[in-house]
Image: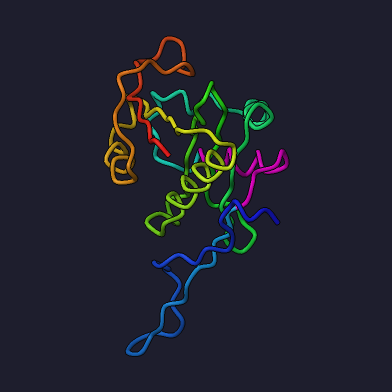
Amino acid sequence: SDSRYPRGELCEDSQDAVGKGPGTRRMKTSVRIRPAVKSDCPAILEVMFSTPMSRESSWWLNTVDSLETKLACGGGFVAEVDGRVVGCVMHVTSGTDLVLRGLAVRPEFGNRGIGTALVEAVEAGARARDLPRVLLAVSASNLEVCDYYLRLGYVVSEEPYAHAAPGRPAPVVFTKEL
């Protein structure tokens, strides 16, 4: 077990309730964050395609094969609940940056801290490799998530995004110094 990555995090907002009526207690959902492996790619694609991402996004061009290539060229993490992949993020090193790509959480598991735990895993991975910064880009068709990254301490950068999809509008680039 690699202690650089968070594991078995208990998320605060569970939708699981035991019993009904007065005295109903909420159970915490145990979420495990772990490095992604090639055999996770079909589940990662399913998570990505479960999100309400605009059809204008290059997100929809992903395939299991393209995810396997991205994973082999960089890495990623998955979030599991009861052995089921419910969240994912990919990353690749570019110079002295760790570039965060493809953060997604199944909608029914949203607002439980899973996305934040995945971002924190990428940040921990960057620190472990002595990379001073995490960089990410938000698609022009997904600007509603910009405030999320600002809350996590990312700042808007004017630099170009080297991984931008050809023929697509320029994304908004965010960086975070670690």
Residue sitting at x 59%, y 59%: 7
Instruction: Tell me which segment is drawn in magenta.
Output: 34-48
140 lies left or right of 38 = left
Report the front residue among 162 and 142.
Answer: 162
Residue 12 falls in image quadrant: bottom left
Which quarter shows the C terminus?
Answer: top left
Q: Where is residue 122 in the image (x, y as percent from the top left)?
A: 52, 42
For the stretch drawn in magenta, the main secondary structure is helix
Relative height, residue 65 to residue 23 (above, below): above
Report the front residue among 141 and 149.
Answer: 149
Relative height, residue 132 to residue 12 (above, below): above
Report the front residue among 23 and 33.
Answer: 33
Q: Where is residue 133 in the image (x, y as percent from the top left)?
A: 45, 33
Relative height, residue 161 to residue 118 (above, below): above
155 lies left or right of 43 = left
**Colour pattern of the rendering:** rainbow
Which quarter shows the N terminus?
Answer: bottom right
Residue 45 falls in image quadrant: top right
Residue 158 falls in image quadrant: top left
Residue extending farthest to the top is: 167
Q: Where is residue 30 in the image (x, y as percent from the top left)?
A: 54, 67
Residue sitting at x 62%, y 51%: 34
Q: Where is residue 39 in the image (x, y as percent from the top left)?
A: 72, 42
Residue sitting at x 59%, y 44%: 77
Relative height, residue 168 to residue 73 (above, below): above
38 magenta-colored: yes
27 magenta-colored: no
